[in-house]
Image: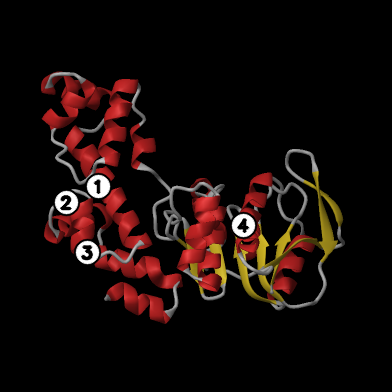
Amino acid sequence: MRKIGFIIYPGYQPMGLASTAPFEMANRQAAEQVYDIRMLSKHGGLVRTSVGFHVSTVRFTEEPYDLIVVGASMEAASPETIELVRHARSHCRRIAATCHGAFVLAEAGLLDGRRATTHWIRAGELRARYPNVRVEEDRIFIADGPVWTSAGMTAGIDLALALIEEDLGLEAARTVARRLVLYHRRAGGQSQFSSLLELEPKSDRIQSVLTYARRNLAARLGVGDLADVAHLSPRQFSRAFLAETGQTPAKAVENLRLEGARALLEDTNHAIDVVAHQTGFGDRNRMRRAFLRAYGQSPQAIRRQSRGYTSTKESELSEA
């Protein structure tokens, strides 16, 4: 059985508790209890959260843990909490932080020289305060050796699923994701930002076009095709789309295809040609040019980078 401890300290954000759900579901679907989940604090007892209710914790003791997780707080971590985390690292195989919890790991010196991420809102602050940390804000989660960090809020669930995949395999993680009613587990290298969120159309008509495009990336998505979905003439549609989103339809479609292709590259072992076909690029060369324009990297490079947390055997399979 793998022992997991969630370090709870004053001001703890309840969203961090959502990261326990994947481990609970993994226990429910297994024939035996896989994870022993504990809420930890320096002295044990009730710890106040950021919204006022209290979490019951047990006192941290010097026993081995497979994983220690530090969540975010709306209050600065006390020197006592920093020391607890620094001390806990020597008693666990892996340590992780979700959202602003990365600041606690950084203050404890556990991120020096390592790659890390956090909520995009505070990534610049993390980089400025801790120059020895290699901050990559546009990541869902990062594993650098035994130290894992995730972006903000729901990204902690993606981090937990990745840890379960490392422990129990890909199919177990997928089953847990399905039980949690998740569309799919986001890969670590996936952007914290969504093309649809950035576009923010003002009308249901343009929103329905974007939804249609995202669900039909492999289809023909020219201006005329999208105008038909909106029940507008191509000229009316192009003007309305640009006015509401600030992008041309062609640019928006390319961004949606890039986002879809990147997710497939990071979350599946589909061949590059298959990914290009499924996302409407048509061929790998066209997709490669789009990736270089948008990300400055080829599809193959992004796939290799996203698989940095997997085992050597899994990495070899992804290259096949």
Q: Where is residue 320 in the image (x, y as percent from the top left)?
A: 26, 76
Amino acid on which disc 1 is placed:
Arg
Residue named by callout 4: 25
Dot 4 falls on a residue whose secondary structure is helix
Amino acid on which disc 2 is placed:
Phe
- Binning the other alpha carbons within 10 Å of mark 1 as few (below 14), some (14 to 19) or many (20 upward) gives many
Q: Disc number at residue 281? A: 2
Residue named by callout 3: 272
- Binning the other alpha carbons within 10 Å of mark 2 as few (below 14), some (14 to 19) or many (20 upward) gives many
Residue named by callout 1: 257
Answer with mark 2 or mark 1, whichever residue precedes in sequence.
1
> For residue 239, which quarter of the picture?
top left
Q: Where is residue 44 in the image (x, y as percent from the top left)?
A: 86, 60
Instruction: Work out whether residue 238 or residue 73 is closer to the camera in this orientation and state it.
Output: 238
Dot 3 falls on a residue whose secondary structure is helix
Amino acid on which disc 4 is placed:
Met
The residue located at (39%, 76%) in the rendering is 314
> From this viewpoint, which residue is outermost toward the front?
31
Q: In this view, does 232 lie above or below 173?
A: above
Between disc 2 and disc 4, the foreground one is 4
Answer with mark 3 or mark 1, whichever residue precedes in sequence.
1
